[in-house]
Image (spheres, rainbow, N blue to C red):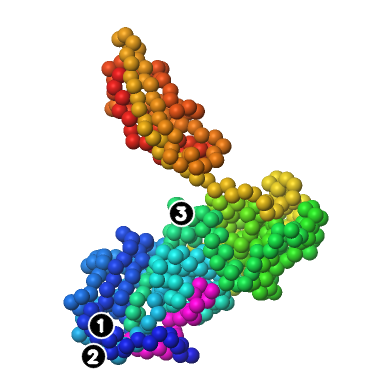
């Protein structure tokens, strides 16, 4: 299955000469291995050694030049999962002169993005760890355009979702195994190594129990730019909202089942007076699922990777995540975090089965499907008696797997009750106006004037001009926050004001230096930056 690398003709002798004379050149962004992406010219890969090779010559460049810190623990993360020790990237160094004794290099003419997929068989991982990070890494570097080629080095085969990876560029992505068919020594003319983590929102619990990332840097806007791109590539057009409103139940067919699915569908349809349909990864094409979800008013599903498809829900839609018995929804929040990203504009509702009668367990299945028969009797009993899985690390906690792979008979009145606490009337995409939140700039021309009345009283008149961007905006409410701090003190007096000037007399002492900090606030919670501090002497 040899792959035609490119139609682009390259002058082999010129390329080889350039490699021998110039060697490898690397310039990276990022201060740590966890936030680094490197751009290379003439990075090579030995398919026999399964190692990347950096060739030194008179013109080679290596920035950062870390010395042996390059192995502590690695130059960079090849996947978007932070600091995972199976995902490290490094290279072996050789003098360019060694090329004389090596297999003839095969040059890769396409601009390459070299990375690892983390878990290409799980849809949540596919979107969160791979597709979004690849998409936005490509946005970061302008020569990673649709003609770039993706190289997946994690060593997995294509996997069930390979078609999704193919949408990201016009060229067929190549897998590590396939590189062998291309040659013994591959040299990437121009390549980028590593993935941006800027869009990821969840950590899977390798070092601390799973949860939202500490510093989320993505908003619904960027998520939706990505889904718009994917929908164009999938040939799914956003239908007119005039069409009928409906609810989608995303069901699993192999495990973690909803046992009374028919009853659930009827109940939802009746309660919300909406058509209710089921989809599953097994029975629908990916495009069909995207088409259905992108116009749905509500998505109802068991906890599980298929819920990442709420990426495609329209603004205003509702996500209902169902949790099996003994699984605390607060402890497993990849889909809640997604739905509640700023600007995602989704309503998120979690429901948990709290009734032991309504759960079906599978103690005798293999351990990776939640079986516990391999554990000692006491441990099995403890697990069966337990009413909540304690927080745990990824990924093989038997109690977690046991509970995660239960089937559930959904208690319909309890579910409807929980949904009704949030969805008062009809759920569904709201034709809402763009409510992008824009922040104020600094206030301008801030001044203060002090006046002293006698030996114990003084006043401070402070004034400023509106932030420059305010005159171009329609803002519901504009307020100003002023902090007055006596020089040398740790505390300050805060004031919220509606006007652009104010005379302070409370607690203002004569012959004292005050620091005055002023910022503008839009609509109660959009805090602008403080203007340069004012020094005022009474
Ligand atoms: N999956 C599915 N139907 C099923 C069970 C699993 O489509 O009945 C898919 C699921 O969406 C995910 C993959 O198979 O993409 C792996 O599922 P697993 O239960 O291991 O992971 P989880 O859904 O808990 O993340």
Apparent side of residue 245 relative to residue 153 in the rendered image (left or right): right
How crowded is the residue under tag 1: few (<14 C-alpha within 10 Å), some, or many (20+)?
some
Marks 2 and 1, how far apart at CA: 17 Å
Q: Mark 2 or 1 closer to N-term?
A: 1
Determine the residue located farthest toward the top in the rendered image. Answer: 454
Q: Is residue 489 magenta?
A: no
Residue 524 or residue 285, whichever sits in front = 524
x 35%, y 80%: residue = 188
Graded by Cα atoms within 10 Å as few (under 14), some (14 to 19) or many (20 or more), the crowding at tag 3 reads few
Q: Nearer the viewer, mark 1 or mark 3?
A: 1
Instruction: Characterize the local packing of mark 2: few (<14), some (14-19) or many (20 or more) Cα atoms within 10 angstroms.
Output: few
Query: Is disc 3 placed on a helix, strand or loop?
Result: loop
Residue extent of the magenta highlight: 165-185
Residue at 53 percent of width and 69 percent of height: 126
The alpha-carbon separation of the residues under discs 3 and 2 comes to: 48 Å
Q: Is residue 3 left or right of residue 65?
A: right
- Identified at 22% across, 90% down, the residue is 100
Residue holding disc 1: 18
Instruction: State which quadrant residue 411 falls in.
Output: bottom right
148 relative to 371 in the view: left or right: left
Rendered position, 348 above or below 275: above
**What residue occupies the far front of the structure in this picture?**
471
Residue that carries the numbered disc 2 in the rendered image: 101
Q: Quadrant of residue 31?
A: bottom left
The answer to whether one can see residue 359 in this image is no
Secondary structure at numbered mark 2? helix
Q: Tell me if label 1 and label 3 are in contact, CB under 8 Å.
A: no
**What is the number of the mark on residue 217?**
3
Is any atom of residue 394 visible in this view?
A: yes
């Amino acid at each position: 299955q040899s792959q035609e690398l490119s139609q682009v003709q390259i002058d082999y002798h010129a390329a080889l000469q350039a490699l021998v004379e110039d060697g490898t050149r690397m310039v990276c962004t990022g201060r740590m291995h966890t936030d680094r992406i490197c751009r290379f010219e003439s990075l090579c890969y030995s398919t026999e050694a399964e190692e990347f090779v950096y060739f030194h010559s008179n013109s080679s460049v290596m920035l950062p030049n870390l010395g042996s810190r390059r192995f502590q623990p690695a130059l960079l993360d090849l996947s978007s999962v932070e600091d995972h020790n199976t995902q490290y990237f490094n290279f072996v160094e050789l003098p360019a002169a060694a090329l004389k004794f090596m297999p003839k290099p095969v040059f890769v003419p396409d601009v390459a993005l070299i990375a690892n997929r983390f878990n290409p068989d799980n849809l949540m991982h596919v979107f969160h760890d791979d597709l979004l990070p690849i998409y936005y890494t490509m946005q970061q570097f302008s020569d990673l355009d649709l003609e770039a080629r993706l190289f997946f080095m994690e060593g997995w085969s294509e996997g069930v979702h390979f078609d999704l990876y193919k949408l990201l560029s016009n060229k067929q992505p190549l897998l590590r195994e396939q590189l062998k068919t291309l040659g013994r020594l591959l040299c990437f003319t121009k390549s980028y190594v590593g993935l941006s983590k800027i869009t990821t929102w969840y950590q899977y619990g390798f070092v601390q129990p799973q949860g939202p990332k500490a510093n989320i840097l993505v908003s619904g806007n960027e998520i939706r730019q990505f889904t718009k791109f994917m929908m164009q590539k999938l040939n799914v057009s956003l239908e007119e909202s005039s069409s009928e409103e409906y609810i989608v139940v995303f069901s699993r067919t192999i495990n973690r089942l909803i046992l009374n699915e028919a009853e659930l569908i009827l109940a939802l349809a009746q309660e919300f007076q909406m058509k209710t349909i089921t989809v599953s990864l097994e029975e629908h094409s990916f495009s069909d699922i995207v088409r259905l979800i992108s116009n749905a008013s509500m998505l109802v599903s068991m906890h599980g990777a298929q819920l990442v498809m709420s990426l495609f829900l329209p603004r205003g839609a509702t996500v209902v995540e169902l949790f099996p018995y003994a699984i605390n929804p607060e402890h497993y929040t990849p889909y809640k975090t997604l739905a509640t990203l700023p600007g995602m504009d989704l309503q998120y509702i979690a429901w948990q089965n709290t009734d032991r009668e309504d759960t079906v367990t599978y103690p005798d299945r293999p351990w990776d499907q939640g079986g516990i028969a391999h554990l000692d009797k006491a441990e099995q009993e403890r697990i069966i008696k337990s009413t909540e899985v304690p927080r745990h690390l990824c990924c093989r906690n038997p109690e977690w797997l046991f509970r995660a792979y239960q089937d559930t008979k959904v208690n319909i009145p309890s579910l409807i009750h929980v949904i009704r606490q949030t969805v008062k009337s009809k759920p569904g995409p709201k034709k809402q106006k763009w409510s992008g939140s824009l922040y104020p700039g600094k206030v301008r021309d801030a001044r203060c004037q002090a006046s002293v009345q006698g030996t114990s009283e003084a006043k401070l008149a402070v004034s400023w001009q509106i932030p420059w961007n305010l005159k171009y905006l329609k803002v519901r409410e504009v307020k100003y926050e002023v902090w007055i701090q006596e020089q040398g003190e740790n505390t300050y007096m805060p004031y919220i004001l509606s006007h652009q000037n104010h005379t302070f007399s409370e607690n203002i002492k004569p012959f004292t230096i005050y620091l005055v900090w002023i910022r503008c606030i839009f609509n109660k919670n959009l805090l602008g930056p403080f203007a340069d501090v004012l020094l005022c002497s009474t």
